[in-house]
Amino acid sequence: MEALQARIESFAKAKRVKNPAKPSSTITLKWPHPAHFTATPESLAEAGFYFNPSLEDRDNVTCYMCDKQLSDWEAQDDPFDIHWEKRGVKCCWAAVRCGLRGDMDRHGAFIFPDKSRLPSSNAMERSRLETFCAGDGWMHDQDATHGANSRKMARAGFVYTPQHAGDDLATCLYCNVSLSGWEADDDPVEEHRKRQSKHSSGPCPFFTSTDASSKPPSRSQSTKPPSTAKPPASRQSRRCLHLQTTTQRTLRPHEDT
């Protein structure tokens, strides 16, 4: 269920569950809520969920990454907010996708009021890296010398957003650049930088926030960090939206259909 389309399609398929009254028979369940609900199949799928009902919880959904299950959806329930509130610390998809709203101002510009969520922070890089473990994992990690291994992809701002089995599509959720067809000599940072510069909306917040956080203080500023400041992101190796507009290369920018 790591592919967005597979999660969307899960809501269109009726599910058979065992009938406790007749163990030899099953009951067919369909997604029960109308289109005016905030939690639509599309928004739930984008927030990381697929339809996984039971006889007791007929609108139950499950996160493809953290296996969190949620049910009893009401009309105004927002799957992004709920996933972030319940699993933002533990689920990589909740962290990288569902927490984005809190990184923006009311006009949709990235301002990162919580500095621990800066794209260059250890926590955000680690969460991006964990997305590459979905399903069968990142195929290019099978080659130890590949230039676009998962660690380098995460460090360059990408998350894994495959559209089908065997797909190596990766996306920056800050500027919506999506690229696939990664080759052994590709440099993810440079590929990202080249393509984000072509966006009419301006430079990617991944680069602008990273550059700003790495600048030394001016002479008029104190060089003593405040007591609540976060340490700079380590450059050492770490463990392991799809939004509305994307761009595709061979290295292929991805085009929505």
Image (spheres, rainbow, N blue to C red):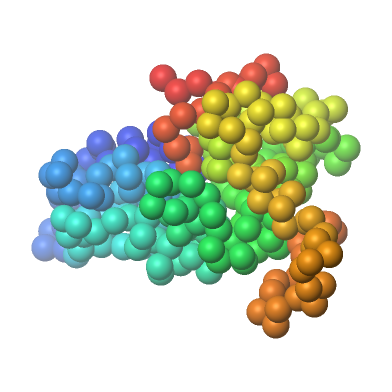
Q: Position of residue 52 (x, y in %)?
A: 31, 52
In the image, 184 versus 100, the foreground residue is: 100
Q: Position of residue 128 (x, y in %)?
A: 63, 51
Outermost residue toward the front in this view: 220
In the image, 28 versus 117, the foreground residue is: 117
Q: Is residue 160 above or below residue 55?
A: above
- Point 24% across, 59% down: residue: 77
- Point 80% across, 63% down: residue: 217
Tell me if I can see residue 152 in this picture.
yes
Compared across the picture, whether 201 is left or right of 223 comes to: left
Q: Position of residue 176 (x, y in %)?
A: 54, 35
- Point 54% across, 42% down: residue: 173
Q: Position of residue 170 (x, y in %)?
A: 61, 36
- Point 72% across, 57% down: residue: 213
Compared across the picture, whether 142 is left or right of 162 comes to: right
Tell me if I can see residue 55 in this picture.
no
Q: Is residue 154 above or below residue 70?
A: above
Outermost residue toward the top in this view: 250
In the image, 146 versus 89, the foreground residue is: 89
Q: Is residue 187 above or below residue 131?
A: above
Outermost residue toward the right in this view: 145
Residue 177: name its quadrant: top right
The C terminus: image quadrant? top left
Q: Is residue 96 above or below residue 116?
A: above
Disc tally is 0
Compared across the picture, whether 34 is left or right of 100 comes to: left
Outermost residue toward the bottom in this view: 227
